[in-house]
Image: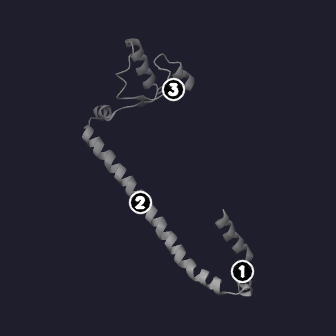
Amino acid sequence: MLDIVKSSPICNGNGAGEINGRGARRRKLTPEQRVSLAADIALRLTPFAPSIGQTAAATGVSPYSIRKELKARSAAKELKARSAAAERERQAEYSRQGALPIVSTWDRATVEGRTEAVRLIGPATVWDVLADVVG
C-alpha cells in the first residue's frame, strides 16, 4: 500500500504520508491533482488529518466545542494517570510497611534461625520470591 501512495501523482516525495488538513489547500496542485488527492483520501490510500475547523464543519459543531472537549479529555487522562501513580505508590508503601517487621526479624535472627525460617516457609516459595526480585 505504501508503494501506491508513494507512486500517487499528488505525493510530494518527502515521505510524509499523512496530509494535514490545514495544509491541504496550500499545496501547489493542478485541478486534476486535487481531484486525485481527494480520491486517494476518500479511498483511504492517503491518511488525512482534518483540522479542528474542518472537523467542526463536517460534524456541525463549533470549533470551540471541540477544543473544550479535547481539553476535558486531556485533563481526565492526566487525572487518571496521576490517580494510577498515586495508587501504585500506596501499594508500594503497603508492601514496604508489611515487609518491615519481616526484615527487622530477619536482621535479628541467627544463621540457624534464618535457615529454619526458610525451611518453614519452603525453599520453593523463597526461590519464587528471589526470581521476582532478580527479575
Residue, disc 1: 118
Q: How many marks?
A: 3
Q: Which percent across, then down, holds residue 42?
A: 42, 25
Task: Give the distance between the C-alpha atoms of the residues marked 3 and 1, in whole angstroms.
Answer: 61 Å
Whole-number angstrom distance, CA of label 3 to CA of label 2: 37 Å
Mark 3 or mark 1: whose residue is earlier in sequence = 3
Left-right relation of 81 to 113: left
Side of 26 relative to 106 (left or right): left
- Amino acid carrying label 2: it is Arg
Earlier in the chain: of badge 3 and badge 2, it is 3
What secondary structure is found at the residue carrying circle 1? helix
The circle on residue 15 is: 3
Q: Which image quadrant for residue 32?
A: top left
Label 2 residue SS: helix
- Label 3 sits on a secondary structure element that is loop
Closer to the camera in the image, 35 or 9: 9
Q: At which x and y percent is residue 39?
A: 43, 20
On screen, residue 110 above or below 40: below
Residue 1 visible from this viewpoint: no
Q: In this view, does 41 lie above or below 122?
A: above
Please rate how many residues cluster around mark 2, counting C-alpha atoms within 10 Å: few if below 14, some from 14 to 19, many from 20.
Answer: few
- Residue 9 makes an appearance in the image: yes
Q: Observer-nearest residue: 1 or 102?
A: 102
Under mark 1, the amino acid is: Val
Q: Residue at x 30, y 41 (%)?
A: 66
> Residue beneath label 2, please?
82
Quarter of image, res 134: bottom right
Name the residue rendered at 32%, 34% in the picture. 55
